[in-house]
Amino acid sequence: KNYDPRARLVRKIADDVFAICGRQPLIEVAMELEKVALNDEYFVKRKLYPNVDFYSGLIYKAMGFPEDMFTILFAVPRLAGWLAHWSEWIDDPDNRIYRPFQIYKGEGIRDYEDMSVRKQKVDETATAMKYSNRSARRAASLGKQ
């Protein structure tokens, strides 16, 4: 475990973004947490450092992205790597580069059904999503909660 060199670069970019977009109070708290993590014996001894997502999250926050979008924003840059791993695995005749398979237990191939004629196959409570604070406020203001 070492300090990720990418984190250093993204940290510098974060400072550039803060210079343009300003710093919100929550960003100030996060930057103070970073100082503590980099200097506190507990974190240093265990080699626990802020990662790239810590800094990119601060950048997204400063740029005004809603927190609900952070997960997808963290995933998009990784997509190229995921596809590269998949492509290498497919192209390797010996399949030496191997990632474990997931076993899909859902329904098999089926014909498309228009939404108006589909039968509900999963209880809505099983797929209910808990709102983030921001989404909950938005939903409540629209009378959807």
Image (spheres, rainbow, N blue to C red):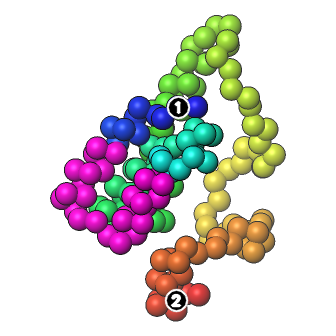
> 103 left or right of 66?
right
Residue 9 in which image quadrant: top left
> What amino acid type should be assigned to the residue bearing mark 2?
Ala
Report the front residue among 60 and 88: 60
> What amino acid type should be assigned to the residue bearing mark 1?
Asn
List the residue tagged with mark 2: 140
**Is 138 drawn above or below residue 95 in the view shown?**
below
Secondary structure type for disc 1:
loop
Residue at 60 percent of width and 11 percent of height: 92
Type of secondary structure dominating the magenta stretch = helix
**Is 23 drawn above or below residue 58 in the view shown?**
below
Residue 68 in the image, given as x and y percentages of width and height: 48, 65
Report the front residue among 125 and 6: 6
Secondary structure type for disc 2:
helix
Image quadrant containing the N terminus: top right
Q: Is residue 118 visible?
A: yes
Residue at 55 percent of width and 87 percent of height: 144
List the residue tagged with mark 1: 2
Asked whether residue 89 is drawn in magenta, I would say no
Asked whether residue 18 is drawn in magenta, I would say yes
Residue 112 in which image quadrant: bottom right
Image quadrant containing the C terminus: bottom right
Residue 77 in the image, given as x and y percentages of width and height: 43, 40
Report the magenta residues as a range: 11-36
Task: Measure the C-alpha gap from mark 1 to mark 2.
Answer: 44 Å
Report the front residue among 138 and 29: 29
Q: Which mark is residue 117?
A: none
* Number of residues whose C-alpha sits closer than 10 Å to that of mark 1, classed few (under 14), some (14–19) or many (20 or more): few
Residue 76 in the image, given as x and y percentages of width and height: 44, 44
> 104 left or right of 81?
right
Report the front residue among 18 and 65: 18
